[in-house]
Image: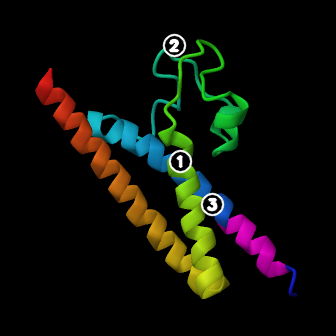
Amino acid sequence: MPFIAPLLTVYMVFIALALGSFINLAADRVPRGESVIRPRSHCRECGRQLNTIDLLPVLGYALRSGRCATCRSPIGASAPLVEATAGGFMAASILWFGIWPGAAAGLAFVACWGLAVTALAARRYATDERTR
């Protein structure tokens, strides 16, 4: 049974990375009043739907060199940073508190991180709209 804790830790960090990817989506769409459900994730420049490789948290960004696979437009460096931070919150929480309390604390930290990132994006969007 001692081998289960590392596997659960890796699993929970992956869940946090995936939540970080959703945080990016929410921070991009919510300030503009768009749905976080439809349409599917796509490049904002050329409209190409993102595939499985593109959607891998942090790794997809690295594999595509931070650019769209079709039009080569740059993807902001904040995308993998937000995802990695969410994963880091989970890993640190599990290391500090243990597997189950740490997973719960990690999810709480990731939720707070998501609210903060989305609120900052909304504030930046509102400021940009006022200056136009």
Up-down: is 87 above or below 62? below
Q: Residue at x 53, y 22 (%)?
A: 74
Q: Which residues are magenta?
A: 4-12
At mark 2, the secondary structure is: loop
Q: Residues within 10 Å of mark 3 (few under 14, many from 20)?
A: some
Residue 61 coordinates in the image, percent (x, y): 64, 35
Quarter of the rendering occupied by the C terminus = top left
Tell me the CA gap for discs 2 and 3.
29 Å
Q: Earlier in the sequence, mark 3 or mark 1?
A: 3
Question: What label sits on residue 46 in the rendered view?
Answer: 2
At mark 3, the secondary structure is: helix
The amino acid at mark 3 is Ile
Whether residue 118 sits left or right of residue 20 in the image: it is left
Q: Which quadrant would residue 34 be assigned to in this image?
A: top left
Residue labelled with disc 1 = 81
Tell me the CA gap for discs 2 and 1.
23 Å
CB atoms of marks 2 and 3 within 8 Å = no
Residue 49 coordinates in the image, percent (x, y): 58, 24
Q: Which quadrant would residue 2 be assigned to in this image?
A: bottom right
Q: Nearer the viewer, residue 119 or 40?
A: 119
Residue labelled with disc 3 = 15
